[in-house]
Image: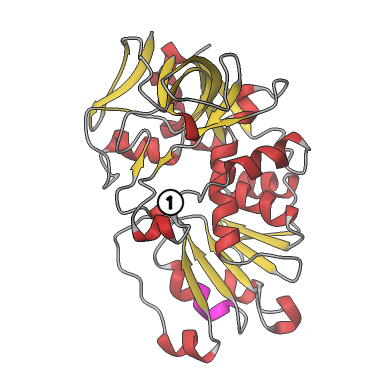
Amino acid sequence: MLEVLVRAPRSLEVRQGTMPEPGAGEVVVHVSRAGICGSDIHILHGSNPFAVYPRIIGHEFAGTVTALGRDVTGIAVGDSVVVDPVVSCGHCYPCRVGRSNVCANLEVMGVHRDGGFRAFVAVPAANAIPVPGDMPFGLAALAEPFSIAANVLDRTGCGPEDTVLIYGAGTVGVTVLQVAKLKGARCIVADIDEARLERALRFGADRVIHSVRDPVPAAVRGENDGLGPTLVIDGAGIPALLDEACRLASPAGRIGLLGFSDAPSNLSQQEVVRKELTIVGSRLNRRLLPRVVEWLADKRLDPQGMITQVFAAADARAAFDLIEKEPQRTLKVQLDFS
């Protein structure tokens, strides 16, 4: 059984692992497709503050249930599933108020515990989300990155009245764009890369801004009857953008932050108070994969073209090399464990 392990920062191994046995309340999933995320790259580089080594990485994965542990109901061998990587305790304050994604005892597959870059993996049955049997596993594995977008847009209350400015046209920006369009918003995407901006237009952006040639604050000044964007999402993870977002956002606007940088951000308290802005952090997802699977199944989300490359799991090193050395060629790279 193949598995992909980061033994230590900068040390990626593809090796033979042992077949897992399901514990009580668990199922074993034969992974078919698994997506490589930016956070997997960060773990490989040693820049993820939460990772413990050695670690089998991977948190975007889908496949087929092959075994059931004791006391598992509601799921059967042969079912197609996508796995929610967020494992929470269910008892702490965040869990009690419906915020299990920031559980005090949070474990994320592929970060705090071993993840889905292996041919077979045991996961809590509650985290195995059924998908239609005719849904391709590559598409099903996209449910997790889309759940990140769904979470930040739920947290910020995105709707048809919004003009959304999205910083960054990578995977995060493109998934936020598609979910915001699903919710009826007007969407503007800013990036420094022309090819990424062209791709954002293909995925439904109403307008794109090349932020080197056309500084964003001036470019969006006329939006929303001159008030500016009502919702700003930092999909680029750049702390310096927070102050800019506060200055260009509309009164009563919201700002959603997805980055994990520990670098300080400067912002004007005056702007926040004067415009009564809401600044929201968003992490992972709050049990949103079933909703995203529905969107994918009925084609309200149709991310045709997001999967830019598929590598055999044995070639994982080559997949990571491509992302690191030629990022302009990639959007979502997946590994095939089938």
- Find residue 70 and report its horizontal and vertical position in percent: 41, 21
| Most common SS among magenta residues | helix
Residue extending furthest front? 71
Disc 1, SS: helix
Q: At 71% across and 65% down in the image, what residue appears?
A: 159
Magenta segment range?
Answer: 245-249
Find residue 40 and report its horizontal and vertical position in percent: 38, 35
At horizontal 62% and vertical 40% (from top left) the residue drawn is 290
Q: Is residue 143 left or right of residue 54?
A: right
Around disc 1, counting alpha carbons within 10 Å, would you say few (fewer than 14), some (14 to 19), or many (20 or more)? Answer: many
| Left or right for 114, reference 128 | left
216 shown above or below 175? below
- Looking at the picture, does residue 202 appear above or below residue 307? below
Residue at the disc numbered 1? 101
Which residue sits at x=61%, y=70%?
231
Please name whichever residue, 100 or 183, is drawn nearer the observer in this view of the structure.
Answer: 100
Q: Nearer the viewer, residue 107 or 234?
A: 107
Residue 123, percent across and down? 42, 27
What is the quadrant of residue 270 in the picture?
A: bottom left
Q: Amino acid at mark 1?
A: Asn
Q: Does residue 310 appear anywhere in the picture? A: yes
Using residue 270 as the reference point, say whether residue 179 is left or right of it: right
Residue 299 in magenta stretch:
no
